[in-house]
Amino acid sequence: MIRVRFLALSTLVLASAVSIRGENWPQWRGPGGQGVSSETKLPTTWAPGKNILWKTELPGTGHSSPVVWGDRVFVTAVIEGEAVPGQQAAPHTQGGKPFVHPDSVAADKKHTFKVVALDSKTGKILWDKTAYDGTVFDARHRRSSFAGPTPATDGTMIYAYFGPEGLYAYDFEGNEKWKVVEKFPTLGLAAGTSPVLHENLVIIQRDEDNGDNSVIVAYDKKTGKEAWRTKRDTQITWGTPVIVQAGGRAELVTNGTESIIAYDPANGKELWRTDGVRSNAIHTPLVGKGLVIVTAGYPAKKVIAIRPGTAQKRVAWEYSKGTGYVVSNILYGDYLYLLTDNGIVTCLNPETGEVKYEGGRIPKPARFMGSPVAFSGFVAMTSEDGDTFMLKAGPSHEISMTNSLEEPVYSSPALSNGRIYIRGDKHLFAIGQ
């Protein structure tokens, strides 16, 4: 049964009556894909019974983040069903030999993929659509989810991506407008990249296994018709590209093991490339201070600051410490914050790579899968235990407070219109003053 619990009702009424200058959170890591909000009325403290406006039980689980546009919140979810005898994952090879990742699971089961719309004011589920129901083409990592990619919206349509199970477009009333399903292997670990919107296009960085059939591809937002497709000579990645404005043009910058490549988002033409991170390319590139900062954390730790546009010398500086495996890093104000998956923080000057501090620790042991967000002078880091550690922004390490939801969290928060939306293991929480 799907339930909505209304908490602190008087606070909810007050919040709805106050005019808050807000912004939408339309994609993975929000505006520009950077995890940073300019809003000034977001809450900085919460706990069960404090500043929790509502919580809604979701139909299924997932690691995708919520996205917000006006009075709508969208999430994706997956429901794991019964085993299907004889069903197996797509075959994989490494070094020319058959390969099965030791952490691959769930390829032998039926799954139901969901796209869900909620009312941002009340948490009421407005519609719940099944995008796909059946067996899956490939397995997932045991700690991952088939509902891993975060959807994207332009205020008219919502675009939900489930890797080899398809890209689906719905209008705000829940009507499916088009879908594109293209099977491809994910090394038995599931897809991680999220859709990026540019003008009339939905863009997917779709790298696979050893890179034999890796591509970056764009579809028309209204029709789903393929607009362009560019071959990529890079092995599987899980990162989401970013749009950068540099030298009077838009550049689509992609993280990659072998190469970091920028494309013209209008037609897919390659604009420039430099050496890649030589690690699993999972993190989203960061943009600021005239640079694109691309990172990775396993097996090698890598930070590469790159000059976009027509720069003659592409790499500004490099650093080889401080990064985690899964968690994307964050550039906020005058500082770059690198985070490990157990919450150790390194702070750098993003223009030079100068270290401001290393080894900053949180108050208690924790593990992180969701990426940090920044607002109101804080970098908020939410652990798998549901604790959000509020790191004071600046060149010295200080955890100012810890907020808890008392529910596991594996996704990244969304910040919009005076509220913080956090997707827990079972519920979506709306936090506000």
Image (cartoon, rainbow, N blue to C red):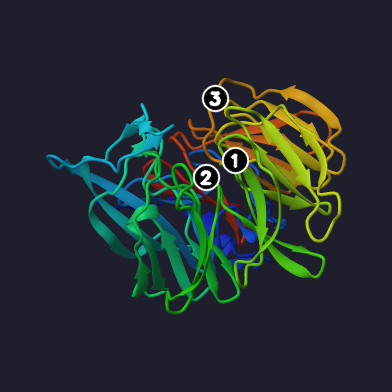
Residue 205 shows up from this direction: no
* Mark nearer the N terminus (3 vs 2): 2
Most distant residue in the bottom direction: 222
Most distant residue in the left direction: 85
Q: Nearer the viewer, residue 43 or 394?
A: 394
Query: Residue 308 in the image: x percent, y percent?
Result: 78, 56
What number is the disc on residue 318?
A: none
Contact? badges 1 and 2 (CB < 8 Å): yes
Mark 1 nearby-residue class (10 Å; few <14, some 14–19, many ≥20): some
| Residue on which the image places disc 1 | 257
Regarding mark 2 in the picture, which secondary structure is present there?
loop
* Mark nearer the N terminus (1 vs 2): 2
The residue at the point 76 percent across, 46 percent down is: 332
Q: Is residue 25 above or below residue 145?
A: below
Q: Nearer the viewer, residue 272 or 14?
A: 272
What number is the disc on residue 237?
A: 2
What number is the disc on residue 366?
A: 3
Residue 61 shows up from this direction: yes
Q: Nearer the viewer, residue 93 or 382?
A: 93
> Foreground mark, 1 or 2?
1
Tell me the CA gap for discs 3 and 2. 26 Å
The residue at the point 60 percent across, 67 percent down is: 268
Q: Amino acid at mark 1?
A: Thr
Query: Residue 245 in the image: x percent, y percent?
Result: 75, 64
Q: Is residue 109 above or below residue 290?
A: above
Q: Amino acid at mark 2?
A: Thr
Tell me the CA gap for discs 1 and 2. 8 Å
